[in-house]
Image (tube, rainbow, N blue to C red):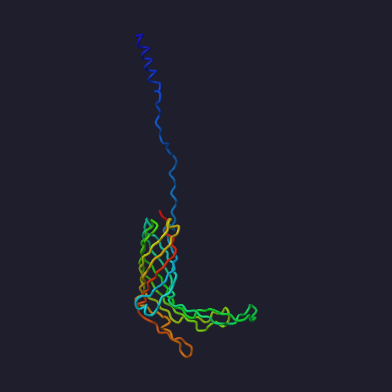
Amino acid sequence: MPRIHPLALLLSLLLSTPLHGQRTPDRPPIDLGPPPAEEPHSKSDPLSGSILAGWGVPVGAFHRNEDGGGGLGLQGAYALDRARHFALRLEGGFLAYGYVTGDVNVPEYDEFGTYQGNTNESYVVRQHLMYSFDVGPEVTALRGRVRPYGFATAGYSFFRSSVNARPPQYAGDSGDDFTIFSSGNFAWSTGIGLRIAAHDARSGTFDVGIRFRRNARAHYVNDRSLSSLPDGAVFVRPFYGSANVITIYAGAWIGPKGR
């Protein structure tokens, strides 16, 4: 029995002492803090918009009566899905398909009415405009450097023609400009385009595309439908029929905020 006690004591010491080279395994730190807060969403996040300049080329019967012209447009959209691919598009703009200016030599006066000599004054002789207002769906891609999109809209076209019956009489005079014809009709359009940028859509992109506008039953006026009477009055004979236009446009687009 006395020999057993030292052996038991030695065994207990060995078991209670950590072995040489043994290391407690590493454990990742535990984050007990609250999760990071998500950035709050705003009602303006799904909004997008663009400003565009384009050149309209008449097609069909409109091409036989007109050569086309330039215009501007504004477009806004509101995304209807979480991915921001599908949106409701609202737009408006104008196309100046007839714009004629003239110059006339007129006297110039200072603020006290003293004659300062003659100068050339430019003024608008006549102009023909087509205003457009449309709404419809748009589908667009929001990833990648090149993002294709397409749209289809329905709306209203308004044609307006005006002439300047009296040239300016002095510097700063705009003459007598008045509307000689106006008319509106239902219209629809469709188009495709590309938005090009290296960053997210919210940072802005270059927008280029082409659209077809269908004015099936339009009344419109251009220079060929105007004639002057001996008493100086202007006789108007409007055209009636399709006034379809293909527009090539380019501009800047700011897309919706990504989720």
Place of residue 198 in the rendered image (x, y in percent of width and height, measured from the top left): 42, 56
Place of residue 152 in the rendered image (x, y in percent of width and height, measured from the top left): 35, 67
Quadrant of the frame with the N terminus? top left
Taking depth in this image into account, of 123 and 38 the one nearest to the observer is 123
Q: How many marks?
A: 0
Q: Quarter-wise, where is residue 82 in the image? A: bottom left
Up-down: is 257 above or below 229?
above
Q: Quarter-wise, where is residue 36 in the image? A: top left
Residue at x-position 44% and y-position 86%:
227
235 sits to left or right of 104: left
215 sits to left or right of 174: left
Q: Quarter-wise, where is residue 116 in the image? A: bottom right
Give the residue furthest to the top: 2
Place of residue 52 in the rendered image (x, y in percent of width and height, measured from the top left): 44, 67
Up-down: is 107 above or below 258?
below
Place of residue 215 in the rendered image (x, y in percent of width and height, measured from the top left): 36, 75
Residue at x-position 43% and y-position 44%:
35
